[in-house]
Image (cartoon, rainbow, N blue to C red):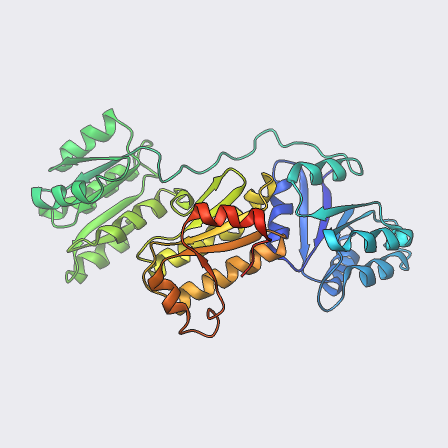
Amino acid sequence: MRYKILSVDDSKTVRIIIKKAFKNYDCEILEASNGVEGLALATKENPDLILLDVTMPVMDGVEMLTKLKSDPALKAIPVIMLTAEGGKDNVLKIAKIGVRDYIVKPFKEDLLVQKVGRIIDLKPITDAPAKAKSIFDPATILVVEDKPAILAQIQDGLKHTPWQVQGVTTTGEAIDFTGRSPVDLMMISLSLPDDAACTLFRVLRTNLKTKYTPIFGLVVKTDTAAQQQAQQVGFTGLVTKPLDMPELESKIAKAMNLDTSERYFLCDGEMFIMKLPEACTPGVVNEVSTYLKGKVADAVNSGINKAVFDLHEVKRLDMSLIKLLLTAMQTCREVALQFTLVGGGTLVAECKGYEDTRGWQFHETIDIARQSFSKTPAAV
């Protein structure tokens, strides 16, 4: 029997933590962001257990719990209340309405699983999916290019990565190489003579070893005919010349489904650190945003309760970066994670020019930020 667990919480981050906690168990997680949505889902799905936040907009947890227990069809569903430390006494007061247990935020995944496991029979999934490879893992990239300067530019531009870039000049050499050694990604010049690039692509797709290998077409930016042909044939993507190496690296990482979060996130002792690079391009901001809530959830699960946003390399502030930082701060608040900022003089001065950032306070170094947590609760 596959159990249904209904998570009712206005914090998306908390819902992510809950979903991750049960990813290796044979159960379905249903989600609602307030009591109204929660009641509707409970009526429709009849879950085996409800994880219910106390404080929510529209309809809070107490009102939803009261309505649940007054409905003959729903009153038998066991409920575990989730609350911040300050609401612990409130949960104890409403326990008489009918809650099975309560959990204080922030909480670890194993505690959540333990308490739920006392109520329903959680069964582990034996074939849990493996994690994606990291951006710091080695990989082999094969470049099929008859112009040595292009190959040299790619090798030089990616030399800071753990990737091994190999080059061949003909389709025959490429077929021989892939037959001998596994390849994680390929790039084929679309300017090879006699339509050799598309012919090679078709051959590679008939081989089990390379059937699902990401393959990019290397093409001059103005050669739209070759680009259209490559897209019709089915190339994974296009890399245009002249080469933009940061863009190429990003495309490679995405095509190989690599986890790039370690560039920006780390845990140092009792602190969770989000470190942003000097060039916070829209691509970087989007990449960080993609990982943010999940990484905060991982930090909370590991017992960390302090966060530092390290911006000391950042020289320029814009609205996309401000929005990212506001989201990061709100995410920390949702899971009761203390946070503070580290930044240089230039950034501090820029913050005074924006209404949303005028009150932000920065520490000069991470060490100073670390010491500040032991003095007073850190906040912005």
- Compare residues 195 and 322 and report the one nearer the observer: 322
Looking at the rendering, which quadrant does residue 378 occupy?
bottom right
- Compare residues 5 and 219 and report the one nearer the observer: 5
Apparent side of residue 176 relative to residue 25 in the rendered image (left or right): left
Q: Residue furthest top?
A: 180
Q: Residue at x 75, y 53 (%)?
A: 52
Residue 22 makes an appearance in the image: no
Q: Residue at x 13, y 42 (%)?
A: 151
- Compare residues 281 and 345 and report the one nearer the observer: 345
Q: Position of residue 213 (x, y in %)?
A: 32, 39
Up the image or down, 185 lies above or below 344; here it is: above
Up the image or down, 314 lies above or below 23; here it is: below
Q: Position of residue 306 (x, y in %)?
A: 56, 47
Q: The N terminus appears in which quarter of the rendering?
A: top right
Residue 174 makes an appearance in the image: yes
Apparent side of residue 207 relative to residue 159 in the rendered image (left or right): right
Q: Residue at x 41, y 48 (%)?
A: 264
